[in-house]
Amino acid sequence: MKQGAGNRLIWFDEEPPKDIWEECFVRVEAGQDLDVILTMTAIKGMTWVYDKLYTATNNPDIFVSEANWKDNPWLLSAQKARMTRGLTPDAL
């Protein structure tokens, strides 16, 4: 993240610490909307993201979309089979 004013878009590719997430909202460019995108694999389990974002269904500013490997048309069945080996049912 660029730590200065004037951001229009902030994109987290993995789950950030909550204090960094909150800091982003003061980095908005004056007079402009700020879009914040968070794409992540929930490898840490139920964290602040679950409580504050994922379940915030009454907040019109939050849009949640889910995807899994079935949604990836380029992931071959053989690749899925290899990745599945050794994973627990919870991990899957």
Image (cartoon, helix red, strand yellow):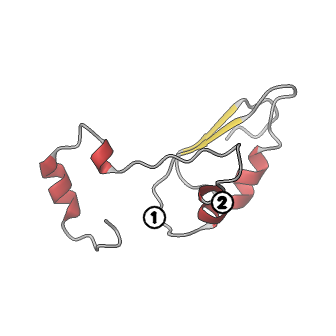
Residue 72, quarter of the rendered image: top left
Instruction: Please state, as top left, top right, bottom left or bottom right, where the C terminus lies in the image.
Output: bottom left
Q: Disc 2 to disc 1, how far (Cα)? A: 14 Å
Residues 88 and 63: in front is 63
Rendering coords of residue 3 (x, y %): 76, 40
Amino acid type, label 1: Ile
Position of 80 compared to 69: left or right?
left
Q: Are marks 2 and 1 in contact (CB under 8 Å)?
A: no
Disc 1: which residue: 43
Residue 49, quarter of the rendered image: bottom right
Rendering coords of residue 59 (x, y %): 71, 50
Position of 16 compared to 82: left or right?
right
Label number found at residue 17: 2
Amino acid type, label 2: Pro
The residue depicted at 50 percent of the width and 67 percent of the height is 44
Give above or below for 40 relative to 36. Answer: below
For the residue labelled by badge 1, is the local secondary structure a helix, a strand or a loop?
A: loop
